[in-house]
Image (cartoon, rainbow, N blue to C red):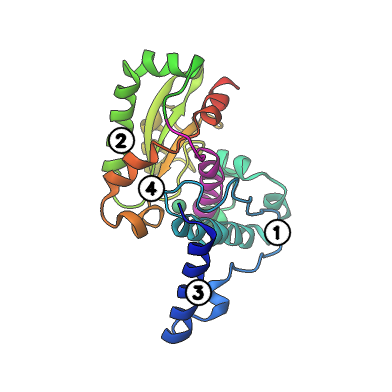
């Protein structure tokens, strides 16, 4: 675990590296200034080093302060010219992408998806997490996957096999039915088919839905970010090691709470 002295030393080293390399200015090392807009970067609910040694502090800092901040900034830019879009929650925007004007739709999908997914992701982890869920969710996992280890195996497989950037999710559909779903890029299980056509059909097929049934996206209960920015500093190309370690920081109380509601 990174203590204060190590943190200061790391900061000093990074500052020194920036000063000597001349490629990074101090301004670039600071969080981007907030852009005015309806969407805000939620604070990380724990310290950067809270998930050590499984997820390192530097990764958490960059992931939250840079990557998530950029999704928020760019989502605010995407809705800047529309009072209608600015008045909606990110969840409502994603649940009904077909109502977003086509000129802004890709930006809302990608940046809004990034904002929504990461806002959940921070809460799905905690210091001293891991173990197995209890209660109603534990029973549903056993009913669906045979056992907790059966779930873990299938979830790990989805996260490992997701090609390129994306996520693997444990989702809840109608009737509280559980399933494991991968999504590409920053797509979220709550999204619904954006418009009629092949994309909508593929989307509907993935979730077993009728195309263009508004609001029929599933509810993400648990998700792992498998973009390289989520693990590369500590695990480099070893995504399976990151996934295995990530199981030690899952906040099952948060996940169970989403299932119960
Ligand atoms: Mn990410």
Q: Position of residue 51 (x, y in %)?
A: 47, 46
In this rendering, the answer to whether 152 lies above or below 89 is above
Q: Which is nearer the N-term, disc 3 or disc 1? A: 3
**Distance (Cα) linking label 1 and label 2:** 37 Å
- Residue 37: assigned label: 1
In this rendering, the answer to whether 102 lies above or below 123 is below
- Residue 12: assigned label: 3
Corner quadrant of residue 143: top left
Q: Nearer the viewer, residue 229 or 6?
A: 6
Majority secondary structure of magenta residues = helix
Left or right: 103 with respect to 206? right
Query: Mark 4 — residue?
Result: 166
The residue range painted magenta reads 109-130
Q: Which is nearer the N-term, disc 2 or disc 3? A: 3
Q: Position of residue 245 (x, y in %)?
A: 35, 42
In this rendering, the answer to whether 72 lies above or below 261 is below
């Amino acid at each position: 675990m990174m203590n204060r002295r190590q943190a200061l030393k790391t900061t000093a080293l990074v500052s020194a590296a920036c000063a000597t390399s001349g490629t990074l200015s101090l301004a670039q090392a600071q969080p981007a200034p907030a852009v005015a807009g309806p969407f805000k970067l939620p604070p990380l609910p724990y310290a950067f080093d809270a998930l050590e040694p499984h997820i390192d502090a530097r990764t958490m800092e960059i992931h939250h302060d840079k990557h998530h901040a950029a999704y928020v900034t760019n989502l605010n830019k995407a809705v800047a010219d529309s009072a209608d879009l600015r008045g909606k929650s990110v969840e409502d925007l994603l649940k009904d992408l077909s109502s977003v004007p086509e000129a802004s739709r890709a930006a809302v999908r990608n940046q809004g998806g990034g904002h929504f997914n990461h806002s959940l992701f921070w809460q799905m982890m905690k210091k001293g997490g891991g173990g197995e869920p209890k209660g109603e969710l534990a029973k549903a996992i056993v009913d669906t996957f045979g056992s907790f280890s059966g779930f873990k195996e299938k979830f790990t497989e989805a996260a490992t096999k997701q090609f390129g950037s994306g996520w693997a999710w444990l989702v809840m559909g109608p009737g509280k039915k559980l399933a494991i779903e991968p999504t590409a890029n920053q797509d979220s299980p709550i999204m619904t088919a954006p418009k009629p056509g092949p994309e909508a059909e593929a989307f509907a097929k993935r979730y077993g839905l009728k195309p263009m049934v508004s609001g029929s996206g599933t509810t993400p209960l648990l998700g792992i970010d498998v973009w390289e920015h989520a693990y590369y500093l500590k695990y480099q190309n070893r995504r399976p090691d990151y996934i295995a370690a990530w199981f030690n920081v899952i906040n099952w109380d948060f996940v169970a709470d989403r299932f119960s509601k």
